[in-house]
Amino acid sequence: MIHWKSIYTFARDIAERGIDVSIDEFKNLGLNTVTIAGSYHAGKFLHPRSSSPVVFPEDGTVYFCNEPSRYGKIKPIRNSILKDRDILGELVRESEIDVNVWLVLLHNTKHGEKNHEDCVANAFGDRYIYNLCPSSPNAREYAITLTNDVAVNYPIVGVSIESPGFTPFVHGFHHEFNLVKPNQWLVNLFGLCFCNNCLKGAAENGIDASGLQKQVRSWIETYLDNDIDYPEDMAESFWLADLATDTELRAFLSWRCKVVTSLVKEIRDTVPSHIAVSVIPSVGRPTANAWYEGSNLVDLREVAGHLEICLYEPNSHRAIADLVDVHRRLGTTDGLRCIIRPSSPDLNSAGEVQSTVSFIAKQGVEGISFYNWGFLRKHNLIYIREALKSIEN
């Protein structure tokens, strides 16, 4: 039986509807937990049930009353809603539903703009300001302190931490655009970080990261200088061949997983033991690709206690296939939670949602979350209620 039944949401949506009304709706849907954003990045979102449906969240801000004195070089930026209300504070004072806090950690353009040396740097030294590097001591301190800050100052049941690692090169940055046809080989090479912290850390582990940097830069330069576009299926094969034959590249990517695992372990060690720590391991699909971001699924579940995987697929069959593969890799569903989107572009019918939820329950997964309350139309919410009712019978 699924014990954790949660819905993701933002403070803005709860503030607009009111605490009592929001909690009543969550309970009527069959939920026992609300997962509210404690820190988030920028975006342009459509909230169909809102009086102001088009929303631009304030970039890189936190939605709880943090303690600035706890932080080092990188300090949280408070969202403007906190000038009037602490929605998280109001929410946790209610006893009718558990509260889990969702924290976006290193994917933070606002902090990246002010702290270039703490950002991911490609083989050419170009800084990716949307991604603080998990090898940076300053970035690590920020992520650890942020999680501990909300965990010790609010009576919450858990934290779901997102983006603890290396964000891929293509991740929907504002007006992301180029006139070079992308392929998996090229974007994966562009996504490798060779900042000073990574070069030093890899070298201390016996990896010639400086040599790898020169090699990657040469590969990219040669590719961009010619007039051949790699077909996608061939580019994927080229990337797999490089992984299989280039021992330095393989060692470097394996080391990146150790970097992220150690960060998550430090977070778990500083958060009070009675508060659950769940890791959202990847922004990519399927979940198996999480290793590229530095997320070793087995290791992260072991050090954190919980994994929360995003089954964001265009149909139930693909979502189920992803879960089956994750189950195979972990060898268990203990500590495993799933997030699904009961709407377009994923599970866009009652049947699709119900079959996915039913399979998740049969696998013995401990928790399920639905993304995201403010983004969903009324009929999508009904899908949630019907699906959860179906697994109680």
Image: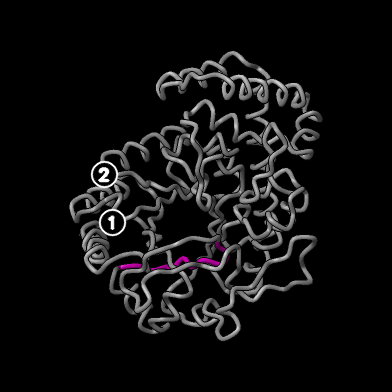
* Residue 386 in the image: above or below residue 307: below
At label 1, the amino acid type is: Ser
Q: Which residue is mark 2?
A: 316
The residues bearing labels 2 and 1 have C-alpha atoms spaced at a distance of 12 Å
Q: Is residue 76 left or right of residue 32?
A: right
Q: Residue placed farthest to the top in the image?
A: 245
For label 2, the SS is helix
> In terms of image quadrants, where is residue 189?
top right
Q: Is residue 274 left or right of residue 199?
A: left
Q: Quadrant of the N terminus?
A: bottom left
Instruction: Say which label, 2 or 1, has the lower sequence index.
Output: 2
- Looking at the picture, the colour scheme in use is one colour
At x 27%, y 48%, the residue is 356
Q: Quadrant of the C terminus?
A: bottom left
- Pick the front one: 157 or 348: 348
Q: Which residue is mark 1?
A: 343
Q: Position of residue 251 (x, y in %)?
A: 67, 24
Magenta-colored segment: predominant secondary structure: strand
- Residues shaded magenta: 30-40
At label 2, the amino acid type is: Ser
Query: Is disc 1 surrounded by few (<14), some (14 to 19) or many (20+) residues within 10 Å?
Result: many
At x 63%, y 29%, the residue is 253
- Pick the front one: 173 or 67: 173
**Residue 39 sits inside the magenta stretch:** yes
